Amino acid sequence: MQMVKKISIIIVAILLSIIIFSPKRELYYLLEDKLKENSIVLYEESIDNNLFTLTVKDAKVSVNGLKLGTIGELDITSFLFYSIVTIYDVSLSSTAQAVAPFKTLNIKISHNIFSPTTLNVTAKLGELLKEAKVKMIDNKIRVYIKDIDGMKYIAPFMRKDKQGWYYETNI
Amino acid sequence: MKPIFNLQSIKNIIPIFIVMIVVKLIYVVLTILFLPSSGQEITSNKKAKALYYRLKLSQSIKSVAPKVTKIEKPKSSIDSIKLMAIYNSNDRLVVTVKSKNKIKVLAKGEEIDGFILTSATRDYAIFTRNEKNYTVQFIKKTKSVNSNIKSMVRDIPKRKGEIDDDTPAIVDDGYTKIVKRGLLQHYKKDNKSIWKDIGINAVKNGSVVNGFKVRFVRKGSDFEKLGIQRGDTIMAVNGEELNNYESAVSLYKNIDTIENLTLTIKRRNKEMELEYEIK
Protein backbone atom coordinates (compact mmCIF):
# COMPACT_ATOMS: atom_id res chain seq x y z
CA MET A 1 0.00 0.00 0.00
CA GLN A 2 2.87 2.31 0.82
CA MET A 3 4.39 1.58 -2.58
CA VAL A 4 1.14 2.40 -4.39
CA LYS A 5 0.97 5.68 -2.51
CA LYS A 6 4.56 6.51 -3.47
CA ILE A 7 3.98 5.72 -7.15
CA SER A 8 0.79 7.80 -7.18
CA ILE A 9 2.60 10.78 -5.69
CA ILE A 10 5.37 10.49 -8.26
CA ILE A 11 2.87 10.27 -11.16
CA VAL A 12 1.07 13.38 -9.92
CA ALA A 13 4.45 15.11 -9.55
CA ILE A 14 5.38 14.17 -13.12
CA LEU A 15 2.07 15.46 -14.49
CA LEU A 16 2.27 18.71 -12.56
CA SER A 17 5.89 19.20 -13.60
CA ILE A 18 4.97 18.62 -17.23
CA ILE A 19 2.25 21.27 -17.03
CA ILE A 20 4.02 23.82 -14.86
CA PHE A 21 7.48 23.63 -16.43
CA SER A 22 6.29 23.42 -20.02
CA PRO A 23 7.99 26.10 -22.12
CA LYS A 24 4.70 27.90 -22.76
CA ARG A 25 6.23 31.02 -24.24
CA GLU A 26 8.36 29.02 -26.70
CA LEU A 27 5.39 26.81 -27.59
CA TYR A 28 3.42 29.99 -28.32
CA TYR A 29 6.23 31.16 -30.61
CA LEU A 30 6.03 27.77 -32.34
CA LEU A 31 2.29 28.34 -32.79
CA GLU A 32 3.09 31.75 -34.30
CA ASP A 33 5.53 30.10 -36.73
CA LYS A 34 2.91 27.55 -37.79
CA LEU A 35 0.29 30.26 -38.24
CA LYS A 36 2.73 32.29 -40.33
CA GLU A 37 3.04 29.34 -42.71
CA ASN A 38 -0.66 29.93 -43.34
CA SER A 39 -0.15 33.70 -43.79
CA ILE A 40 -1.55 34.49 -40.33
CA VAL A 41 0.77 36.68 -38.26
CA LEU A 42 0.35 37.52 -34.57
CA TYR A 43 2.65 40.35 -33.56
CA GLU A 44 3.41 43.18 -31.12
CA GLU A 45 1.94 41.20 -28.21
CA SER A 46 2.98 41.05 -24.55
CA ILE A 47 3.25 37.59 -22.98
CA ASP A 48 2.75 36.59 -19.33
CA ASN A 49 3.86 33.10 -18.39
CA ASN A 50 1.77 31.91 -15.44
CA LEU A 51 1.72 28.62 -13.57
CA PHE A 52 -0.93 26.91 -15.66
CA THR A 53 -1.84 29.56 -18.21
CA LEU A 54 -0.09 31.59 -20.85
CA THR A 55 -1.66 35.03 -21.23
CA VAL A 56 -1.04 36.99 -24.42
CA LYS A 57 -2.22 40.60 -24.45
CA ASP A 58 -2.82 43.05 -27.29
CA ALA A 59 -1.71 40.74 -30.08
CA LYS A 60 -2.27 42.25 -33.49
CA VAL A 61 -3.50 39.91 -36.20
CA SER A 62 -2.62 40.09 -39.85
CA VAL A 63 -3.93 37.65 -42.47
CA ASN A 64 -2.40 37.69 -45.94
CA GLY A 65 -0.87 41.07 -45.13
CA LEU A 66 -4.23 42.53 -44.08
CA LYS A 67 -4.35 43.91 -40.57
CA LEU A 68 -7.55 42.39 -39.26
CA GLY A 69 -7.59 43.62 -35.69
CA THR A 70 -6.27 43.24 -32.18
CA ILE A 71 -6.80 40.44 -29.68
CA GLY A 72 -7.28 42.08 -26.27
CA GLU A 73 -6.39 38.92 -24.34
CA LEU A 74 -5.61 35.35 -25.29
CA ASP A 75 -5.42 32.76 -22.51
CA ILE A 76 -4.03 29.32 -23.26
CA THR A 77 -4.49 26.75 -20.49
CA SER A 78 -3.58 23.11 -20.79
CA PHE A 79 -4.12 20.29 -18.31
CA LEU A 80 -2.73 17.77 -20.83
CA PHE A 81 -6.03 15.93 -21.17
CA TYR A 82 -8.12 19.04 -21.48
CA SER A 83 -7.06 22.37 -22.96
CA ILE A 84 -8.84 25.70 -23.27
CA VAL A 85 -8.01 28.69 -25.39
CA THR A 86 -10.01 31.80 -24.55
CA ILE A 87 -9.87 34.86 -26.75
CA TYR A 88 -11.32 38.06 -25.29
CA ASP A 89 -12.03 41.46 -26.76
CA VAL A 90 -11.08 40.99 -30.36
CA SER A 91 -11.54 44.37 -31.96
CA LEU A 92 -11.73 44.23 -35.71
CA SER A 93 -10.03 46.80 -37.90
CA SER A 94 -12.08 48.87 -40.31
CA THR A 95 -10.80 46.59 -43.09
CA ALA A 96 -12.20 43.51 -41.38
CA GLN A 97 -15.45 45.27 -40.51
CA ALA A 98 -16.04 45.78 -44.23
CA VAL A 99 -16.44 41.98 -44.45
CA ALA A 100 -17.58 41.00 -40.96
CA PRO A 101 -20.43 43.14 -39.64
CA PHE A 102 -19.46 43.14 -35.98
CA LYS A 103 -16.91 45.11 -34.03
CA THR A 104 -16.07 42.84 -31.11
CA LEU A 105 -15.55 39.15 -30.80
CA ASN A 106 -14.97 36.71 -27.91
CA ILE A 107 -14.12 33.07 -28.55
CA LYS A 108 -13.64 30.05 -26.29
CA ILE A 109 -12.06 26.96 -27.81
CA SER A 110 -11.79 23.72 -25.88
CA HIS A 111 -10.19 20.42 -26.73
CA ASN A 112 -10.03 17.12 -24.93
CA ILE A 113 -7.63 14.33 -25.70
CA PHE A 114 -10.38 11.70 -25.94
CA SER A 115 -11.78 13.43 -29.02
CA PRO A 116 -8.53 14.54 -30.63
CA THR A 117 -9.92 15.61 -34.02
CA THR A 118 -12.64 17.90 -32.64
CA LEU A 119 -12.55 21.41 -31.22
CA ASN A 120 -15.55 22.92 -29.48
CA VAL A 121 -15.95 26.62 -30.14
CA THR A 122 -18.22 29.16 -28.50
CA ALA A 123 -18.09 32.56 -30.13
CA LYS A 124 -19.74 35.81 -29.20
CA LEU A 125 -19.91 37.96 -32.30
CA GLY A 126 -21.14 41.34 -31.13
CA GLU A 127 -24.50 40.43 -29.58
CA LEU A 128 -24.74 37.00 -31.24
CA LEU A 129 -23.72 33.89 -29.31
CA LYS A 130 -22.80 30.98 -31.57
CA GLU A 131 -21.59 27.47 -30.93
CA ALA A 132 -19.54 25.53 -33.42
CA LYS A 133 -17.56 22.32 -33.75
CA VAL A 134 -14.37 22.15 -35.77
CA LYS A 135 -13.70 18.65 -37.07
CA MET A 136 -10.77 17.29 -39.01
CA ILE A 137 -11.93 14.74 -41.59
CA ASP A 138 -9.56 13.28 -44.22
CA ASN A 139 -7.23 16.29 -44.55
CA LYS A 140 -10.19 18.63 -44.49
CA ILE A 141 -11.32 20.97 -41.78
CA ARG A 142 -15.06 21.20 -41.33
CA VAL A 143 -16.60 23.89 -39.17
CA TYR A 144 -20.15 23.03 -38.09
CA ILE A 145 -22.20 25.98 -36.88
CA LYS A 146 -25.31 25.18 -34.87
CA ASP A 147 -27.44 27.81 -36.55
CA ILE A 148 -26.54 30.60 -38.92
CA ASP A 149 -29.44 32.92 -38.07
CA GLY A 150 -28.25 36.49 -38.11
CA MET A 151 -25.16 35.50 -40.10
CA LYS A 152 -26.42 35.81 -43.66
CA TYR A 153 -23.03 37.08 -44.77
CA ILE A 154 -21.46 33.64 -44.29
CA ALA A 155 -24.30 31.70 -45.95
CA PRO A 156 -22.71 31.76 -49.44
CA PHE A 157 -19.68 29.92 -48.06
CA MET A 158 -21.67 27.28 -46.15
CA ARG A 159 -23.02 23.86 -47.05
CA LYS A 160 -25.49 21.66 -45.25
CA ASP A 161 -25.61 18.01 -44.22
CA LYS A 162 -27.40 15.92 -41.55
CA GLN A 163 -25.42 17.57 -38.76
CA GLY A 164 -26.25 21.08 -39.94
CA TRP A 165 -24.54 23.98 -41.71
CA TYR A 166 -20.80 23.66 -42.21
CA TYR A 167 -17.84 25.37 -43.85
CA GLU A 168 -15.16 23.14 -45.29
CA THR A 169 -11.61 23.83 -46.36
CA ASN A 170 -8.63 21.67 -47.31
CA ILE A 171 -5.47 21.58 -45.23
CA MET B 1 13.98 15.74 22.17
CA LYS B 2 11.68 16.23 19.16
CA PRO B 3 13.52 16.31 15.80
CA ILE B 4 13.01 19.43 13.62
CA PHE B 5 12.99 17.42 10.36
CA ASN B 6 11.29 14.13 9.90
CA LEU B 7 13.87 12.17 7.94
CA GLN B 8 11.20 9.90 6.48
CA SER B 9 9.32 12.92 5.02
CA ILE B 10 12.50 14.26 3.46
CA LYS B 11 13.16 10.86 1.95
CA ASN B 12 9.69 10.96 0.41
CA ILE B 13 10.10 14.48 -1.01
CA ILE B 14 13.49 13.87 -2.64
CA PRO B 15 12.13 11.64 -5.44
CA ILE B 16 9.51 14.35 -6.23
CA PHE B 17 12.25 16.97 -6.54
CA ILE B 18 14.26 14.64 -8.74
CA VAL B 19 11.25 14.10 -11.01
CA MET B 20 10.70 17.86 -11.26
CA ILE B 21 14.34 18.53 -12.06
CA VAL B 22 14.39 15.81 -14.72
CA VAL B 23 11.23 17.16 -16.39
CA LYS B 24 12.63 20.69 -16.34
CA LEU B 25 15.94 19.51 -17.83
CA ILE B 26 14.12 17.63 -20.62
CA TYR B 27 12.13 20.79 -21.38
CA VAL B 28 15.27 22.93 -21.44
CA VAL B 29 16.93 20.59 -23.92
CA LEU B 30 13.80 20.39 -26.11
CA THR B 31 13.43 24.17 -26.04
CA ILE B 32 17.03 24.75 -27.07
CA LEU B 33 16.90 22.13 -29.82
CA PHE B 34 13.44 22.50 -31.33
CA LEU B 35 11.52 25.56 -30.20
CA PRO B 36 11.86 29.11 -31.52
CA SER B 37 13.15 31.69 -29.08
CA SER B 38 11.32 34.70 -30.50
CA GLY B 39 7.95 35.52 -31.99
CA GLN B 40 6.89 36.89 -35.34
CA GLU B 41 7.03 40.53 -36.22
CA ILE B 42 5.55 42.26 -39.16
CA THR B 43 7.39 44.80 -41.24
CA SER B 44 5.36 47.83 -42.09
CA ASN B 45 4.79 48.53 -45.73
CA LYS B 46 6.73 51.23 -47.43
CA LYS B 47 4.94 54.51 -47.65
CA ALA B 48 2.51 54.68 -50.52
CA LYS B 49 3.56 56.84 -53.39
CA ALA B 50 1.68 60.04 -53.83
CA LEU B 51 -0.99 60.05 -56.47
CA TYR B 52 0.15 61.53 -59.72
CA TYR B 53 -1.21 62.13 -63.13
CA ARG B 54 0.04 60.61 -66.32
CA LEU B 55 -0.75 62.86 -69.19
CA LYS B 56 0.25 62.71 -72.81
CA LEU B 57 2.89 65.37 -72.99
CA SER B 58 5.26 63.41 -75.18
CA GLN B 59 5.53 66.01 -77.95
CA SER B 60 5.30 68.98 -75.72
CA ILE B 61 7.81 67.91 -73.07
CA LYS B 62 10.56 67.80 -75.68
CA SER B 63 9.98 71.44 -76.34
CA VAL B 64 10.18 72.36 -72.67
CA ALA B 65 13.60 73.79 -72.08
CA PRO B 66 14.53 74.92 -68.60
CA LYS B 67 15.26 78.45 -69.71
CA VAL B 68 14.90 81.48 -67.52
CA THR B 69 12.59 83.97 -69.11
CA LYS B 70 12.45 87.61 -68.42
CA ILE B 71 9.34 88.71 -66.66
CA GLU B 72 7.61 91.12 -68.89
CA LYS B 73 4.79 93.40 -68.14
CA PRO B 74 1.56 91.40 -68.07
CA LYS B 75 -0.31 91.63 -71.27
CA SER B 76 -3.58 90.09 -70.24
CA SER B 77 -5.57 88.92 -67.21
CA ILE B 78 -5.39 85.50 -65.52
CA ASP B 79 -8.83 84.66 -66.95
CA SER B 80 -7.32 84.34 -70.41
CA ILE B 81 -5.24 81.36 -69.20
CA LYS B 82 -7.04 78.00 -69.28
CA LEU B 83 -5.51 75.02 -67.52
CA MET B 84 -5.59 71.79 -69.54
CA ALA B 85 -3.25 69.35 -67.79
CA ILE B 86 -0.92 69.01 -64.83
CA TYR B 87 2.05 66.71 -64.48
CA ASN B 88 3.27 66.91 -60.91
CA SER B 89 5.93 64.57 -59.60
CA ASN B 90 8.44 64.97 -56.79
CA ASP B 91 11.07 66.50 -59.02
CA ARG B 92 9.11 68.00 -61.88
CA LEU B 93 6.14 70.19 -62.45
CA VAL B 94 4.77 70.73 -65.93
CA VAL B 95 1.42 72.19 -66.87
CA THR B 96 -0.33 72.59 -70.18
CA VAL B 97 -2.26 75.81 -70.58
CA LYS B 98 -4.24 77.47 -73.33
CA SER B 99 -3.96 81.19 -73.86
CA LYS B 100 -5.23 83.17 -76.83
CA ASN B 101 -6.06 79.93 -78.65
CA LYS B 102 -2.47 78.74 -78.31
CA ILE B 103 -1.51 75.73 -76.24
CA LYS B 104 1.68 76.09 -74.27
CA VAL B 105 3.53 73.74 -71.96
CA LEU B 106 5.15 75.40 -68.95
CA ALA B 107 7.72 74.08 -66.53
CA LYS B 108 7.97 75.47 -63.02
CA GLY B 109 9.36 79.01 -63.11
CA GLU B 110 8.29 79.71 -66.69
CA GLU B 111 5.87 82.45 -67.48
CA ILE B 112 2.95 83.08 -69.71
CA ASP B 113 1.44 86.51 -70.25
CA GLY B 114 3.45 87.78 -67.29
CA PHE B 115 2.22 85.06 -64.92
CA ILE B 116 4.93 82.76 -63.53
CA LEU B 117 4.11 79.13 -62.75
CA THR B 118 5.11 78.49 -59.13
CA SER B 119 3.30 75.34 -58.02
CA ALA B 120 0.32 73.10 -58.63
CA THR B 121 -2.00 70.67 -56.87
CA ARG B 122 -4.15 67.91 -58.34
CA ASP B 123 -6.83 70.38 -59.35
CA TYR B 124 -5.23 73.73 -60.06
CA ALA B 125 -2.01 75.53 -60.94
CA ILE B 126 -0.69 78.53 -59.04
CA PHE B 127 0.86 81.47 -60.86
CA THR B 128 2.39 84.60 -59.40
CA ARG B 129 2.53 88.11 -60.73
CA ASN B 130 3.82 91.10 -58.79
CA GLU B 131 4.05 88.91 -55.64
CA LYS B 132 0.36 88.05 -55.91
CA ASN B 133 -0.82 84.46 -56.28
CA TYR B 134 -3.40 83.42 -58.87
CA THR B 135 -4.97 79.98 -59.13
CA VAL B 136 -6.12 78.54 -62.43
CA GLN B 137 -8.47 75.59 -62.32
CA PHE B 138 -9.05 72.95 -64.94
CA ILE B 139 -11.28 73.85 -67.86
CA LYS B 140 -14.78 72.62 -67.15
CA LYS B 141 -16.22 70.62 -70.01
CA THR B 142 -18.92 72.47 -71.84
CA LYS B 143 -21.89 70.80 -73.48
CA SER B 144 -20.23 70.94 -76.87
CA VAL B 145 -17.17 69.15 -75.49
CA ASN B 146 -19.34 66.47 -73.95
CA SER B 147 -21.22 65.98 -77.15
CA ASN B 148 -17.94 65.09 -78.84
CA ILE B 149 -17.29 62.36 -76.34
CA LYS B 150 -17.89 59.10 -78.03
CA SER B 151 -19.83 56.70 -75.92
CA MET B 152 -17.99 53.44 -75.73
CA VAL B 153 -20.82 51.55 -74.16
CA ARG B 154 -24.50 51.09 -74.06
CA ASP B 155 -26.36 52.81 -71.26
CA ILE B 156 -26.37 50.76 -68.12
CA PRO B 157 -29.41 50.38 -65.91
CA LYS B 158 -29.50 52.86 -63.04
CA ARG B 159 -28.30 51.54 -59.74
CA LYS B 160 -28.80 52.60 -56.19
CA GLY B 161 -26.42 55.42 -55.34
CA GLU B 162 -25.73 56.24 -58.95
CA ILE B 163 -26.04 59.78 -60.19
CA ASP B 164 -29.46 60.15 -61.64
CA ASP B 165 -28.85 61.33 -65.18
CA ASP B 166 -29.01 59.79 -68.61
CA THR B 167 -25.33 59.70 -69.51
CA PRO B 168 -23.64 56.30 -69.47
CA ALA B 169 -21.57 55.31 -66.45
CA ILE B 170 -18.41 54.89 -68.52
CA VAL B 171 -17.50 57.04 -71.51
CA ASP B 172 -14.34 57.26 -73.55
CA ASP B 173 -13.02 60.63 -74.72
CA GLY B 174 -10.39 58.94 -76.86
CA TYR B 175 -7.60 59.22 -74.34
CA THR B 176 -8.97 58.49 -70.88
CA LYS B 177 -12.18 56.78 -69.88
CA ILE B 178 -14.48 58.88 -67.75
CA VAL B 179 -16.16 56.88 -65.01
CA LYS B 180 -19.11 58.14 -63.02
CA ARG B 181 -18.48 58.28 -59.30
CA GLY B 182 -21.93 56.77 -58.75
CA LEU B 183 -20.72 53.55 -60.36
CA LEU B 184 -17.86 53.28 -57.89
CA GLN B 185 -20.17 54.07 -54.99
CA HIS B 186 -22.51 51.34 -56.18
CA TYR B 187 -19.73 48.75 -56.25
CA LYS B 188 -18.46 49.91 -52.86
CA LYS B 189 -21.90 49.53 -51.28
CA ASP B 190 -22.71 46.23 -52.95
CA ASN B 191 -19.36 44.47 -53.00
CA LYS B 192 -20.96 41.12 -53.83
CA SER B 193 -21.83 42.41 -57.29
CA ILE B 194 -18.12 42.93 -57.99
CA TRP B 195 -17.45 39.22 -57.79
CA LYS B 196 -20.32 38.44 -60.17
CA ASP B 197 -18.70 40.65 -62.80
CA ILE B 198 -15.02 39.94 -62.28
CA GLY B 199 -12.84 37.27 -60.72
CA ILE B 200 -9.44 38.22 -59.35
CA ASN B 201 -6.72 36.07 -57.80
CA ALA B 202 -3.52 37.19 -56.16
CA VAL B 203 -0.39 36.22 -58.07
CA LYS B 204 1.93 34.89 -55.42
CA ASN B 205 5.63 34.18 -55.47
CA GLY B 206 6.01 32.34 -52.18
CA SER B 207 4.43 34.66 -49.67
CA VAL B 208 4.97 37.77 -51.78
CA VAL B 209 2.06 39.10 -53.83
CA ASN B 210 3.01 40.14 -57.38
CA GLY B 211 -0.21 41.78 -58.50
CA PHE B 212 -3.72 40.44 -59.03
CA LYS B 213 -4.67 38.34 -62.04
CA VAL B 214 -8.07 38.68 -63.67
CA ARG B 215 -9.60 35.20 -63.95
CA PHE B 216 -12.75 36.27 -65.77
CA VAL B 217 -14.66 39.36 -66.78
CA ARG B 218 -18.39 39.00 -67.37
CA LYS B 219 -19.39 39.97 -70.89
CA GLY B 220 -21.12 43.34 -71.00
CA SER B 221 -20.11 44.14 -67.42
CA ASP B 222 -18.69 47.50 -66.34
CA PHE B 223 -15.28 45.91 -65.94
CA GLU B 224 -15.27 44.88 -69.59
CA LYS B 225 -16.22 48.43 -70.50
CA LEU B 226 -13.29 49.67 -68.45
CA GLY B 227 -11.04 47.72 -70.81
CA ILE B 228 -10.02 45.02 -68.36
CA GLN B 229 -9.53 41.62 -69.98
CA ARG B 230 -9.26 38.06 -68.77
CA GLY B 231 -5.62 37.19 -68.14
CA ASP B 232 -4.58 40.78 -67.28
CA THR B 233 -2.45 41.14 -64.18
CA ILE B 234 -3.06 44.36 -62.29
CA MET B 235 0.40 45.36 -61.08
CA ALA B 236 -0.12 48.85 -59.67
CA VAL B 237 -2.74 51.51 -59.08
CA ASN B 238 -1.75 55.18 -59.34
CA GLY B 239 1.88 54.14 -59.22
CA GLU B 240 1.46 52.18 -56.00
CA GLU B 241 2.40 48.56 -56.46
CA LEU B 242 -0.17 46.00 -55.42
CA ASN B 243 2.26 43.78 -53.56
CA ASN B 244 0.03 42.90 -50.65
CA TYR B 245 -3.64 42.51 -49.85
CA GLU B 246 -3.64 45.62 -47.71
CA SER B 247 -2.82 47.94 -50.59
CA ALA B 248 -5.70 46.39 -52.57
CA VAL B 249 -8.14 46.79 -49.67
CA SER B 250 -6.91 50.33 -49.01
CA LEU B 251 -7.64 51.19 -52.65
CA TYR B 252 -11.10 49.62 -52.36
CA LYS B 253 -11.84 51.63 -49.20
CA ASN B 254 -10.88 54.92 -50.84
CA ILE B 255 -12.14 54.22 -54.33
CA ASP B 256 -15.03 56.66 -54.09
CA THR B 257 -12.82 59.59 -53.11
CA ILE B 258 -10.18 59.44 -55.82
CA GLU B 259 -10.37 61.58 -58.92
CA ASN B 260 -7.99 59.87 -61.30
CA LEU B 261 -7.07 56.25 -61.60
CA THR B 262 -4.19 54.70 -63.51
CA LEU B 263 -4.04 50.92 -63.58
CA THR B 264 -0.68 49.44 -64.55
CA ILE B 265 -1.43 46.05 -66.02
CA LYS B 266 0.51 43.25 -67.63
CA ARG B 267 -1.21 41.92 -70.72
CA ARG B 268 0.44 39.16 -72.74
CA ASN B 269 3.77 39.93 -71.02
CA LYS B 270 3.57 43.59 -72.01
CA GLU B 271 3.13 46.28 -69.42
CA MET B 272 0.52 48.91 -70.22
CA GLU B 273 -1.60 51.50 -68.49
CA LEU B 274 -5.34 52.05 -68.34
CA GLU B 275 -6.36 55.54 -67.35
CA TYR B 276 -9.64 56.72 -65.90
CA GLU B 277 -11.05 60.00 -64.76
CA ILE B 278 -13.64 59.77 -62.01
CA LYS B 279 -16.43 62.35 -62.26
Image (cartoon, rainbow, N blue to C red):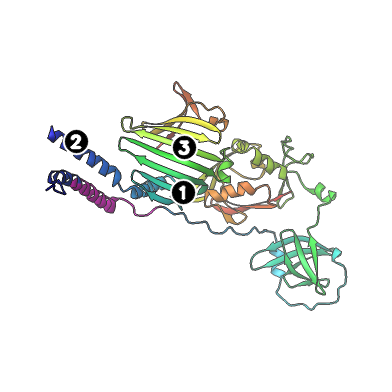
Answer with the quarter of the image where residue A112 lies: top left
- State the mark number for residue A107: 3
What type of secondary structure mainly makes up the magenta span?
helix
Label 2 belongs to which residue? Answer: A8
Query: What type is the residue that disc 3 sits on?
Result: Ile
Q: Earlier in the sequence, mark 1 or mark 2?
A: 2
Using residue B52 as the reference point, say whether residue A170 is left or right of it. left
| Residue B7 point in image, percent of width and height | 13, 46
Q: CA distance from mark 1 to mark 2?
A: 40 Å
Q: What amino acid does circle 1 point to? A: Ala
Residue B167 seen by the camera: yes
Q: Which residue is denoted by mark 1 in the rendering?
A: A59
Q: Quadrant of residue A3?
A: top left
In terms of depth relative to the viewer, which is nearer, A59 or B9? B9
Highlighted range, magenta? B17-39
- From this view, report whether residue B201 is shown above or below residue A166: below
